[in-house]
Amino acid sequence: MNDAMRGRARTRSRPLHRPTAWNPPGEIGETYTVEVDRSGGAIEAFDMAGTWTVGLLPKGAMEITPPPPFLRSWDRPTGDVFTVTGDTLRTNAFVQLCASSIGTYAWALRDDRLTLVPLTEDCEARKALFTASAWVRE
């Protein structure tokens, strides 16, 4: 057996590490809605006013349902994911508007109201929507 084959054999024998995309399940994993008023800035620029629904699914997927005005200008959000570590939520939501940007938010859930506060965020559309108001758990 040559050195290259030995290296591959060693590589294959290592256990695969698959990080979990969602931690902890059930803490904030639910469906939320928020009513966004037309208030200028990014909300108006991206036609984001209206009722939004976001499902935070157990495997780390986000299911985002935007209001009709947004869909007249933009494609339905797809491929959005998130991770939760402690009181921090990271997401690539609005990949079609924010390229490969990742936003990091502190989150708090009180009385079925989810509040997100940006820690690092360079996507104005995502920041405007996620911080417009508290998200209400359905």
Image (cartoon, grey):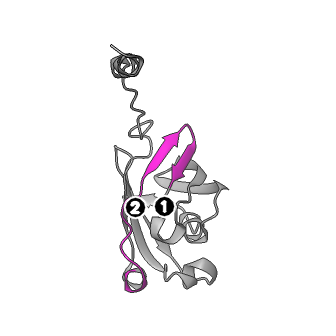
Give the percent coordinates (x, y) of residue 38: 55, 84
Task: Tell me if mark 1 has few (under 14), some (14-19) or many (20+) residues whose alpha carbon lies within 10 angstroms of its own.
Answer: many
Q: Nearer the viewer, residue 102 or 116?
A: 102
x 37%, y 59%: residue: 79
Task: Tell me if mark 2 has few (under 14), some (14-19) or many (20+) residues whose alpha carbon lies within 10 angstroms of its own.
Answer: some
Please state the extent of the stretch shown in magenta in the rendering: 71-91
Q: Residues under labels 2 and 1: Cα distance?
A: 9 Å
x 56%, y 59%: residue: 101
**Where's the C terminus, which quadrant?**
bottom left
Q: Nearer the viewer, residue 61 or 4?
A: 4
**Where's the N terminus, which quadrant?**
top left
x 37%, y 81%: residue: 71
Q: Eyeballing the image, is 16 above or below 89?
A: above
Residue type, numbered disc 1: Trp
Can residue 75 be found in the magenta stretch?
yes
- Residue placed furthest toward the front: 2
Task: List the residue tagged with mark 1.
Answer: 135
Label 1's element? strand
Q: Earlier in the sequence, mark 2 or mark 1?
A: 2
Count the numbered circles shown: 2
Give the percent coordinates (x, y) of residue 9: 34, 18
Whether label 2 touches label 1, CB < 8 Å? yes
Give the percent coordinates (x, y) of residue 75: 37, 76
Q: Is residue 93 visible?
A: yes
- Residue placed furthest toward the right: 119
Q: Which mark is residue 54?
A: 2
Can residue 124 be found in the magenta stretch?
no
**Could you tell whether 21 is left or right of 89 in the image?**
left
